[in-house]
Image (spheres, rainbow, N blue to C red):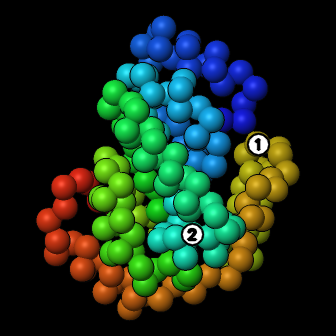
């Protein structure tokens, strides 16, 4: 959303019309918009991070975690209470550090964390999806191809981490 060429105009319109709006972002452009967002009352951010620094940077690239976390810290310090949620997609690369990730996000003073198990589709599911979209909408879908990869979650690691998270009393909401 921050790459939208009229984003500033959109924020001003949201404020003028008093429209409560959730903006989902990977956070990589967040820092440059802090002056615009720090006094908003109607925009709520949902920032996607894929785990602790090592896990996130393995998935998203070196330095991404620090960049996003620095922007969140600065926005939290300068804003008048902007709502910041974290969307954490659980993958094989980060499933074993879910608990530590939650601890780190609480220290960052975010308002909420969503632990979102990643989902993918197999060839058979993709075929059914394509047939449905063609039949119902007369269109040839392509976006689903990004979800057609092998995904073998470590269910034992997930259960261990999630149970550890559930046992603790957190100062924020953590959903899964």
Q: Which residue is mark 2?
A: 56
- Separation of residues labelled 1 and 2 (CA atoms): 37 Å
Neighbour tally class for label 1: few under 14, some 14-19, many 20 plus, Cα within 10 Å: few
Is 91 positioned to the left or the right of 164 in the image? Answer: right
Is 3 positioned to the left or the right of 75 in the image? Answer: right
State the residue at coordinates (47%, 35%). 22
How many marks the image carries: the answer is 2
Q: Is residue 39 above or below residue 66?
A: above
Quarter of the image that includes the C terminus: bottom left
Q: Which mark is residue 137?
A: 1
- x%, y% of residue 43? 45, 28
Closest to the observer, 1 or 40:
40
Closest to the observer, 33 or 12:
33
Q: Secondary structure at mark 2?
A: helix
Q: Which mark is residue 29?
A: none
Residue 158 lies in quadrant: bottom left
Closest to the observer, 91 or 129:
91
- x%, y% of residue 52? 47, 71
State the residue at coordinates (42%, 22%). 39
């Amino acid at each position: 959303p921050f790459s939208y060429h009229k984003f500033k105009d959109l924020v001003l319109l949201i404020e003028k019309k008093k429209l409560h709006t959730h903006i989902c972002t990977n956070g990589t452009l967040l820092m440059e918009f802090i002056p615009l967002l720090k006094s908003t009352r109607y925009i709520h951010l949902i920032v996607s991070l894929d785990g602790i620094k090592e896990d996130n940077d393995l998935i998203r690239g070196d330095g991404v975690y620090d960049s996003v976390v620095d922007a969140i810290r600065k926005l939290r310090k300068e804003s008048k209470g902007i709502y910041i949620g974290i969307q954490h997609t659980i993958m094989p690369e980060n499933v074993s550090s879910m608990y530590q990730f939650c601890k780190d996000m609480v220290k960052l003073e975010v308002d909420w964390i969503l632990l979102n198990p990643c989902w993918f589709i197999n060839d058979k599911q993709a075929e059914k999806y394509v047939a449905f979209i063609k039949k119902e909408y007369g269109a040839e879908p392509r976006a689903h191809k990004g979800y057609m990869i092998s995904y073998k979650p470590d269910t034992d690691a997930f259960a261990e981490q999630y149970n550890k998270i559930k046992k603790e009393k957190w100062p924020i909401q953590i959903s899964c």
